Amino acid sequence: MSSHAVVHTPVGGELMTPFFRKLLFFVALGAAAVLWRFAFGIGAVSNLNDGYPWGIWIAFDVVTGTALGCGGYAVALLVYVLNKGEYHPLVRPAVLTSLLGYGLAVLAVTIDLGRYWDLWKVPVFFWRWSGSPQLEVALCVAAYVTVLLVELSPAAFEKWKDGAHAGLRRLSEAGLRFMDKALVWILALGMLLPTMHQSSLGTMMLLAGPRLHPLWFTPWLPFLFLVNCIVMGYAVVVLEASWSAREFGRPREDAMLAKLSNVAFYVAAFWLAFRALEVVVAGDLSLVASPIGVVFLVELALAALPVWWLSNDARRADAAYQVRSALMLVLAGTVYRINTYWIAFNPGPQWSYFPAVPELLITFGIVALEIALYLWAVRTFPILAGGEAGAVARG
């Protein structure tokens, strides 16, 4: 199916709903904490220390947030690499969620950096830095945000090309022509960059060495993180499609989501089997009996439950099970990543860490901002496929 066969329309309707106002309240709380952080330093709002220099802003906002933003990457693998054009209606909303997830991860990194004013030097003077996985992640994420902006630009061009402003009409026509010619190269970058930096997020915790518990420390961390982000990407796409269909009165693509859930089942089952087998082969199975082994078992159970649900054809076709399974896959992936970056990391008995209230407020604010921007975008631009423009959401 070509991109021209899919009709996207803005949702329209009132933006300032009660739910949207609640989101803005949390955004305001987070913004106040961010201003406090920049005014009085990172120590004024966080419990970060020399033992735990990476806290919730990295473990959740960046490491988990970018995985939740891999819907565009995961669906693009199906549509453009495996040539499954039937999933094309899911591409544009998936790219939007990817852009929001990655863009706000960049914001979280900026808040987390001690010398944030030097951040601009990373892409400009990249040859001065060591060939570390942190550098590769920084450069790839920055480049990927740009690629996502370009990928999503047709939504803006389509809105502007029929508008009253002559300059925007000309820009839109030129932009759409450029996208028709350059799309193959943009998609290639869109495939390459997440493959590189998602695996490198696993590589970064190899630097922890013995400080990372053996149940999580493995040379296969880069591979596990890459497959995990694909699982989470599919799950987020199912959740986004289900939620938008319900809230905005769009037609629900039950058959397509059932097939996507089938894909998610096989990828998640592979990840679960590989994760468990790696521990057995490495000879770390006896560590499961330790206190932190309970955390490991919970992690596996969270992944095993949706795999079991999706193993049945009838449940895969059931909308309720599609949503439940997707939620559990997101939760399982989130727990795995937070465990790797935080719970299973032990710098020594003299160090401890739990997020301070302002840290949590900033994280809640970033999540609320992502949802608010999504609502604004789908109401304003042709993002979602099908349905009638101007449909009123219950939000």
Image (cartoon, grey):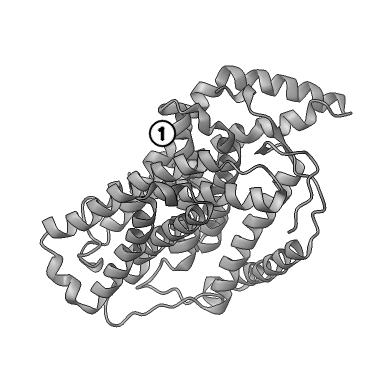
Q: Element type at marker 1? A: helix
Where is residue 229 drawn, in percent x and y?
Answer: 40, 49
Residue at (64% x, 70% y) in the render: 39
Residue at (39% x, 41% y) in the render: 263
Q: Nearer the viewer, residue 391 or 185?
A: 391
Q: Label 1: which residue?
A: 192
State whether residue 334 is above or below residue 154: below
Where is residue 129 drawn, in percent x and y?
Answer: 38, 46
Residue most toward the right? 164
Residue at (21% x, 56% y) in the render: 218
Q: Nearer the viewer, residue 130 or 3?
A: 3
Q: Nearer the viewer, residue 102 or 306?
A: 306
**Quadrant position of the N terminus in the picture:** top right
Q: Quadrant of residue 92?
A: top right
Residue 222 visible in the shown view: yes
Where is residue 182 drawn, in percent x and y?
Answer: 56, 20
Relative side of 66 to 351, left or right: right
State whether residue 167 is above or below residue 340: above
Residue 226 visible in the shown view: no
Residue most toward the bottom? 350
**Quadrant position of the C terminus in the picture:** bottom right
Report how many numbered discs are placed on residues in the image.
1
Q: Residues within 10 Å of mark 1 (few under 14, many from 20)?
A: some
Q: Quadrant of residue 325?
A: bottom left
Relative side of 327 to 16, left or right: left
The amino acid type found where label 1 is placed reads Leu
State whether residue 23 is above or below residue 239: below
Q: Quadrant of residue 287?
A: bottom left
State whether residue 280 is above or below residue 292: above
Residue at (52% x, 33% y) in the render: 87
Where is residue 309 drawn, in percent x and y?
Answer: 38, 56
